[in-house]
Image (tube, rainbow, N blue to C red):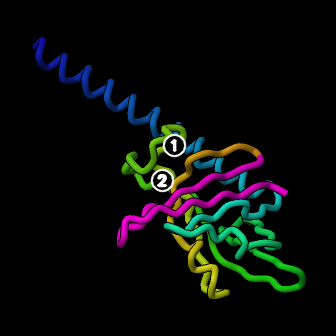
């Protein structure tokens, strides 16, 4: 009887912990989405494996919209892509435990230079005015860094 009671209590405890993690993950997903949607952004740093490519994105304004649409404008030219925030459930993506396992996904079909931004980024830091991201390439093991700053 004691063993049965122990198994029951252990099962209830583990289940309660899982619910807390799901609730925490859900609130972190909401926090990231709300931060991104709230305003216009510019890229202040983009390091692609071994090259600083920040200048390639000067004068572009990024808007993360509802419905997972990202709009980028430069003057009168506009491009559309998609973005999302997802829980990859592996929990081992980044060393910053605040957003462990949460991916910031960006995808562009055009213009040609924007395919470098099309990745499933790890969130390394998030404030109301800055989003810092990292992607480790599975092919060559290079690390890309991307920073958005609110305008």
Q: Position of residue 113 (x, y in %)?
A: 63, 83
Eyeballing the image, is 116 above or below 28? below
The outermost residue toward the top is 2
SS category of the residue bearing label 1: helix
Name the residue at 72% across, 50% down: 130
Instruction: Give the numbered dot on residue 87.
Output: 2
Count neighbours of disc 2 (C-alpha within 10 A) and say few if under 14, some if 14 to 19, many if 20 or more: some
Quadrant for residue 16, please give it: top left
Q: CA distance from mark 1 to mark 2?
A: 7 Å
Q: Position of residue 62 (x, y in %)?
A: 76, 68
The outermost residue toward the right is 76
Task: Find out whether residue 146 is within the magenta segment.
Answer: yes
Instruction: Give the numbered dot on residue 25.
Output: 1
Lateral position of residue 39 relative to residue 53, left or right: right
Eyeballing the image, is 50 above or below 35? below
Labels 1 and 2 touching (C-beta < 8 A):
yes
Q: Which residues are magenta?
A: 129-151
SS category of the residue bearing label 2: strand
Quarter of the picture containing the N terminus is top left
Q: Main secondary structure of the magenta part?
A: strand
31 and 11: which is toward the camera: 31
12 and 21: which is toward the camera: 21
Quadrant for residue 28, please give it: top right
Name the residue at 71% across, 58% down: 148
84 and 120: which is toward the camera: 120
Q: Position of residue 50 (x, y in %)?
A: 51, 67
Eyeballing the image, is 25 above or below 64? above
Name the residue at 57% across, 80% down: 115
């Amino acid at each position: 009887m004691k063993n049965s009671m122990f198994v029951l209590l252990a099962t209830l405890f583990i289940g309660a912990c899982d619910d807390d993690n799901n609730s925490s993950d859900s609130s972190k997903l909401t926090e990231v989405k709300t931060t991104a949607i709230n305003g216009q952004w510019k890229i202040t740093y983009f390091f692609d494996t071994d090259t600083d490519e920040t200048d390639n994105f000067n004068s572009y304004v990024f808007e993360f919209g509802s419905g997972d649409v990202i709009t980028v404008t430069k003057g009168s030219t506009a491009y559309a892509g998609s973005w999302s925030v997802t829980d990859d459930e592996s929990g081992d993506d980044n060393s910053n435990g605040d957003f462990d396992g949460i991916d910031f996904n960006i995808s562009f079909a055009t213009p040609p230079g924007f395919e470098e931004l099309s990745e499933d980024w790890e969130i390394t830091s998030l404030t109301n005015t800055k989003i810092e991201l990292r992607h480790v390439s599975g092919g060559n093991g290079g690390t890309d860094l991307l920073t958005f700053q609110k305008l």
